[in-house]
Amino acid sequence: MDAFVYREESGSRVLHAEGVSLPAIAAQFGTPTYCYANGVLVARYQALAQATPNARICYAVKANDTLAVIRTFARLGAGADIISGGELHGALRAGVAPDRLVFAGPGKTRDEMNLALASGVGQFNVESPAELEALDAAARAAGTRAPVALRVNPDVDAETHDKIATGRRGDKFGIDDADIPALYARAAALEGIEPLGLAVHIGSQLSRLAPFEAAFERLVALVEGLRAAGHPVTRINLGGGLGVRYRDEAPPDVEAYGALVERVRQRLGVTVVIEPGRWLVAPAGVLLTRVIAVKQAGARCWAIVDAAMNDLMRPALYDAWHAIEPVAEPAPDDVTVETDVAGPVCESGDVLGRGRALPPLAAGDLLAVRDVGAYGSVMASTYNGRPLPAEVMVRGDALASIRPRQDHEALLARDLVPPWLG
């Protein structure tokens, strides 16, 4: 599924995204630029759909919210997992059917609830008693019923980074599993609520199936208890979280994950929803950046590039590791230099990669930061007055802009000066 490989171009070998060379993209769109390979998106979706043929796939928009990415999956039959009113608007604009939207997240506002009800969202993942009551009031005021799955906090350690674990006791997400029976009974009694079932999501970038199994077993026990108490349960939402390989991780293969999902479905005889994000999009993207300067600081060699922590936050936020490759293929016998790759932002944490074995670099050289299709551009900011980067998509030999580079005027257009400042 790797679309980013070295190919011949004008007598040298350079990285391509499918049939388009990265130097050609840099020449047309400048740097930094996010580039996504449509073929990888399609191939990974099809692989997941084949592994989970009886599950409803709702793409987790938070991983990458570009309309082109969402529409790619919508045209393949995907729904969408959304977290905000903004993601709701984006999913609808991209062509996702409203009844295939799952509205998740622990802090839905009344305005967002009203918007989702008016749009005909197919499922709300409710995360607290207070949210259930507020959603009931909103639905009754709108003269409708809200389809609900209660999100369970199963107290399972996902064995992932602390900042992306969501299923442990005390995390802000979900409802303690011991409280589910009483709250489900309350949901069944509310006029504005249509209880469908339960949901669970214990975190992102899971590298083993065991945490999934533990969470799913807890969900199965809860469903069986609810049914024994006389409550119908027709749907379970198993969340996402399947990890990808950034460096040396060995996450479960998609077929093993799919077999686990199918075993749960057969045991309960329910509709199953899954919410993949990272697994679908991370390997489909690279961040193309150009070297501004190379400097020596004591024993350390620094390559200062024009992409920064505001463009790709994951290394600064999570100490995340992304492969960094020269766009021009080095010769097999070329020497390498241990190089720290950093951006120009005025923060010591603005480092995209430390101690990378790279050929000797010079100003103007192009680098590609790999596996940034998930949680890359979607988390970008304009810190240090840096406009948001360009984003493009390739399909075969075709290249298209999907988000033009923000310019400085657009950045300043957000601001208003009070009249007393003239």
Image (cartoon, rainbow, N blue to C red):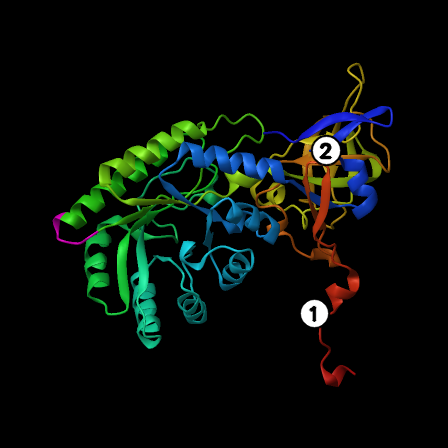
Report x, y in % for residue 28. 82, 46
Q: Residues within 10 Å of mark 2 (few under 14, many from 20)?
A: some
Q: Is 68 on the left or on the right of 186, as rendered?
A: right
Q: Nearer the viewer, residue 385 or 364?
A: 364
**Up-down: is 298 above or below 224?**
above
**Residue range (magenta):** 228-232
- Residue type indicated by callout 1: Arg
**Up-down: is 114 above or below 101?**
below
Q: Is 36 on the left or on the right of 8, as rendered?
A: left
Q: Which residue: 36% across, 34% down?
A: 211
Q: Nearer the viewer, residue 311 or 236?
A: 236
Q: Which residue is mark 1?
A: 414
Direction bottom: furthest residue? 420
Query: Mark 1 vs mark 2: which is more N-terminal?
Result: 2
Question: In which quadrant of the rendered image does the C terminus lie?
Answer: bottom right
User: Disc number at residue 19?
Assistant: 2
- Residue type indicated by callout 2: Gly
Report x, y in % for residue 5. 70, 27
Q: Nearer the viewer, residue 276 or 177?
A: 276
User: Disc number at residue 400?
Assistant: none
Tell me if residue 58 can be seen: yes
Question: In which quadrant of the rendered image does the N terminus lie?
Answer: top right
Secondary structure under tag 2 reads: loop
